[in-house]
Amino acid sequence: MNKQEYAEYIKKITPKSKIWSSLCRAFIVGGLICLLGEGLNALYHMWLPSYDQTQISALVSSTLIFFAAVLTGLGIYDKIGYFAGGGSIVPITGFSNSITSAAMEFRKEGIIFGTCANMFKIAGPVIVVGVAVAMLCGLGYFVVGLFL
Amino acid sequence: MSTLIFKQKPRIIGWYSVVGKKESEGPLGYTFSRIVKDEYFGEKTHEGSERKFFITAIQGAIQVAGVQPDIVFAGDLLNQIVSSSFAMRDIGLPYVGVYGACSTMALSLLTAATFLESGVIQTAVAVAGSHFATAERQYRTPLEFGNQRPPTAQWTVTGAGATVLSTKQKSRFAVTCGTIGRVVDYGVKDVNNMGAAMAPAAADTLMRHFKNTKTKPSDYDAIFSGDLGQIGEEALRDLLKEQGYDLGENYYDCGKLIYDASQKVDMGGSGCGCSAVTLNGFIMNKFRNGEYHKILFMATGALLSPTTSFQGESTPGIANAVVIEEVTE
């Protein structure tokens, strides 16, 4: 077998991810996290009637971030992630998990060079891409607006 | 010739294996010398724990052998092989660090046997080990990060194994020859498919070994590969079949032996510790019980670093093979 034949051979014998069961699990868990967010939204509206939607949304996000960080610290979130895959990575709870897990992992190297230097190791690229895409969208929106 | 024949037949006079909880719950659990359920082994960091596994294995093997060794040959997976050298800080014996990624157990055995063959020393220890948590940190993501493992992933073994070789002491078991591996790269870039990356190197070493020693697979009671896992094992069988060698029923992969399917390890075990603890537990116990008389132990390594894989390089593999047999004289 040459290199090319070997690459094709390996592709043939490598087991594939079970896409349908993965998608279903991601849908269910991801959906449940969003449902929890909606539930919190309704609760905060009930408890804090004087707050507007922007303030309530910030409270909902912070609550989800807080609980995901606690579950990460307790060693539970990675088990949810093992089951749900993208379903628990994509919501804001996954973002919280990626930062908390990295912060915990590198704590042993000290606060500055360990935790602070490494806590955005996984989330960093997401933030960079998010900001860059937002800028491009904003630019597009502006350019289109000039002609309308 | 890349196959080394040891006329002095360095004897194996002691062996010791120490593993973590998950390994003790696997099918080979009963074969290990010591089980440590605490992943930290009483230390503050996982790196400290890995060191302590090394110290325990080296001291254990020396105690079993009952002889003070001249040199310790050790290697591990962490950057600058710190587990080995930091462990040797406490052991206090002369030390040679070796690195062959997960092929280190076979490499340290071959290096020790070569030193002994030359006659400059009389007793040596060969040791290798790894720790799941330190390998995850160096090569992959934080432990608590909630991602899914791809189906081709392998699980790094937590444990260390040590073998004491001697040309002075008597024993029924000896290292008689071995083949040093070549670095072979078939262009596999998927860092989650180490078995596929290492199989061509394993096939290369086995074929050269069979040719150089004029042996065939059926001449051995068993042939072991280190940590090829399910895909690598299948690929090795097929690569050898293409060259006219049938590995048959007596070929095993340590990575597939050490865990069972219910332990969620996907393709099987990996890491320096995988072949080291299987050799110094399961395999040597079989020798002691008289079930094996001659085996070929080939540890396999993927010679990548996180830097090379992020820079888009493929994963080169290496495999080192050692023949262990029962001797009479």
Image (cartoon, coloured by chain):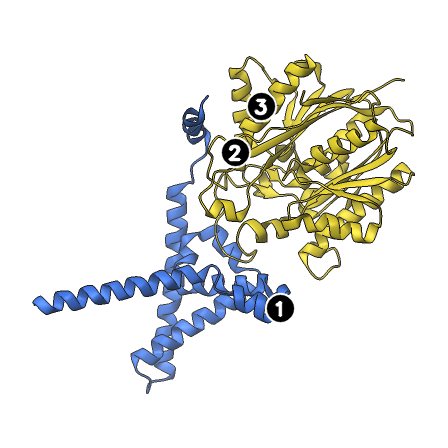
Chain colours: A blue, B yellow
Closer to the eye: label 3 or 2: 3
Measure the alpha-carbon separation of dots 1 and 2: 36 Å
For the image, the number of numbered tags is 3
Residue type of the residue flagged with mark 2: Ala
Quadrant hosting residue B200: top right
Q: Position of residue B320 (x, y in %)?
A: 66, 29
Measure the alpha-carbon separation of dots 1 and 3: 45 Å
Q: Position of residue B328 (x, y in %)?
A: 88, 17
Q: Chain of mark 3?
A: B
Residue shown at 71% from the left, 50% from the top? B83
Q: Chain of mark 2?
A: B
A123 shown above or below B56:
below
Residue shown at 61% from the left, 36% from the top? B301
Quadrant hosting residue A107: bottom right
SS state under label 2: helix
Q: Indicate left or right for B250 with A86 as reference.
A: right
Camera-side residue of B307 and A88 = B307
Which residue corresponds to mark 3?
B204
| The disc label shown at residue B197, or none | 2
Most distant residue in the bottom direction = A50
SS state under label 3: helix
Q: Position of residue B37 (x, y in %)?
A: 73, 51
Which residue corresponds to mark 1?
A110
Q: Residues at marks 3 and 2, common chain?
A: yes
